[in-house]
Image (cartoon, helix red, strand yellow):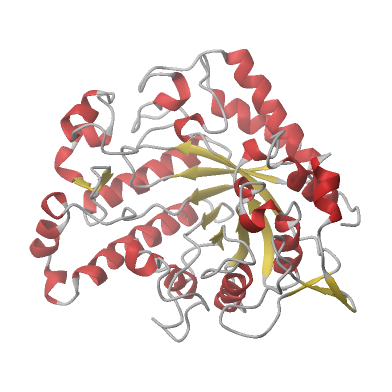
């Protein structure tokens, strides 16, 4: 019933083979930010070679622990069945959440979100089984890793949290290599050479032992919200000669860039066919900050400044194989509209060997505002895929593909689109 009710009130002005978008909530035209140009989407969908979902394991968002292994295996099969139903050909599966592992490792303990307690062994090599099941269906497997994060929040002191960690945890072994966010979240210090070496060693161990098609980083570099000044990286900054040449912000970006480049080289030296991709926060810089920035409002968060993630430089330096900017805003967003941000990333990756995939916030379907429109994600896919530079689409996160409530109408529409039905 909800699906029928939504469809009846969608209004689009059709112009030739394209449609001018109007807001779902009040039928006002949707313009590019700060312009009088109305956004248009193609009437047809162009299929792209990369179609993927994120499977998020941190705090067990998409999967339970393996304590009930039969239940876990059945859920993996359902994920793969869902991929086939939606014509997806890739899963981006989280294997490192908080400085841990969802696989056998000599460097990292098994994750508490995997076995129920950090360091506890699973009944068998579960990740190898998951990968084999994906490969049987010709579904590519990208191992999603978080390079720096140690804890999710600051609910416990550093000492208190490390007491909950297994002795194999690098953070527990090297508490002097840790820094804190303003809210007390623990991360590895990106400016430490030892930390970068550890991350690269972890990646190498993973690709040596598991048949992965790609290594994938998400958007967490320096923490959102900034560092605790008394437990930050100032000491490291002062001790390195770079402090004489670089501002603190540039110093941080230098070390993140260096980590990315070292990981890229580590992967390519082992096997050049393994892809290395990153899914950054959707806004690099705003146009007011930089003439080359996205057409978004000056007040928007910028990954360049907030997270010290110079995503555009990674593309220029060709130290990643693909980029998946998280454009989790709707077309009608007041300060960060989907279309403006998508066009920015198309320009960044145009004529580059770095493939551009668009990250869509399927988790927002059916929630509020323009995401009440069940066709919001369908429209985003049609819009993005009209550009030759866009090579694919990725959706956050798996559980919303099987949602039977708010996201259901929108995800059913997406399924129809991907299965060749007219939407």
Relative horizontal placement of residue 259, taking residue 274 as reference (left or right):
left
Q: Is residue 417 visible?
A: no
Q: Is residue 115 or residue 200 the one in the foreground?
A: 115
- Quarter of the figure that contains the C terminus: bottom right
The quarter of the image holding the N terminus is top right
Residue 248 percent location from the top left of the image: 19, 68
In this rendered view, identify the residue nearer to me: 107 or 345: 345
234 and 318: which is toward the camera: 234
Q: Where is residue 417 drawn, in percent x and y? A: 83, 53
Instruction: Please give the name of the residue rendered at 21% of the width and 47% of the height, measured from the top-left corner.
Output: 180
Residue 191 x, y percent position in the rendering: 23, 57
Label count reads 0
From this view, report whether residue 220 is shown above or below residue 171. Answer: below
Left or right: 186 with respect to 201?
left
The structure residue drawn at horizontal position 21% and vertical position 24%, both measured from the top left corner, is 163
Q: Is residue 343 visible?
A: yes
Q: Quadrant of residue 298?
A: bottom left
Tell me which corner region of the image, top left, top right, bottom left or bottom right, holds residue 9: bottom right
To which quarter of the image does residue 136 belong? top right
Say if 267 sits above or below 80 in the image. Answer: below
Q: Residue furthest front?
A: 26
Q: Residue at x 44, y 58 (%)?
A: 264
Determine whether, in the image, residue 375 is placed left or right of residue 95: right
Q: Residue at x 74, y 40 (%)?
A: 408
x%, y% of residue 79?
68, 32
């Amino acid at each position: 019933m909800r699906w029928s009710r939504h469809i009846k009130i969608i209004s689009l002005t059709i112009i030739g083979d394209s449609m001018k978008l109007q807001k779902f909530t009040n039928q006002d035209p949707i313009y590019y930010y700060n312009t009088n140009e109305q956004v248009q989407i193609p009437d047809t969908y162009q299929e792209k070679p990369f179609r993927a979902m994120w499977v998020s394991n941190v705090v067990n968002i998409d999967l339970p622990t393996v304590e009930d292994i039969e239940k876990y295996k059945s859920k993996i099969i359902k994920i793969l069945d869902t991929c086939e139903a939606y014509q997806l050909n890739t899963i981006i599966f989280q294997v490192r959440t908080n400085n841990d592992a969802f696989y056998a490792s000599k460097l990292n303990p098994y994750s508490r979100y995997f076995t129920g307690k950090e360091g506890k062994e699973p009944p068998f090599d579960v990740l190898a089984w998951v990968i084999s099941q994906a490969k049987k269906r010709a579904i590519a497997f990208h191992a999603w890793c978080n390079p720096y994060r140690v804890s999710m929040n600051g609910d416990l002191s550093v000492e208190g949290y490390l007491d909950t960690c297994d002795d194999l945890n690098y953070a527990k072994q090297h508490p002097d290599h840790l820094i804190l966010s303003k809210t007390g979240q623990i991360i590895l210090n990106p400016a430490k050479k030892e930390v970068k070496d550890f991350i690269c060693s972890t990646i190498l161990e993973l690709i040596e032992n598991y048949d992965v098609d790609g290594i994938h980083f998400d958007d967490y570099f320096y923490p959102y919200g900034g560092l605790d000044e008394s437990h930050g990286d100032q000491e490291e900054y002062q001790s390195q000669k770079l402090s004489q040449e670089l501002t603190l912000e540039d110093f941080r970006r230098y070390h993140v860039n260096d980590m990315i480049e070292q990981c890229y080289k580590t992967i390519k030296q082992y096997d050049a066919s393994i892809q290395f991709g990153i899914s950054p926060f959707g806004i690099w810089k705003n146009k007011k900050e930089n003439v080359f920035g996205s057409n978004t409002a000056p007040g928007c968060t910028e990954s360049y400044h907030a997270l010290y993630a110079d995503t555009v430089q990674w593309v220029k330096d060709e130290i990643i194989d693909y980029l998946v900017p998280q454009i989790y805003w709707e077309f009608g967003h007041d300060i960060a509209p989907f279309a403006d941000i998508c066009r920015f990333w198309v320009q960044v990756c145009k004529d580059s060997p770095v493939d551009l995939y668009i990250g869509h916030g399927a988790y927002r379907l059916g929630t509020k505002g323009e995401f009440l429109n069940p066709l919001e994600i369908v429209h985003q896919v049609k819009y993005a895929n009209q550009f030759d530079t866009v090579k694919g689409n990725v959706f956050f996160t798996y559980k919303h593909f099987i949602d039977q409530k708010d996201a259901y109408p929108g995800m059913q529409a997406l399924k129809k689109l991907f299965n060749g039905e007219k939407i």
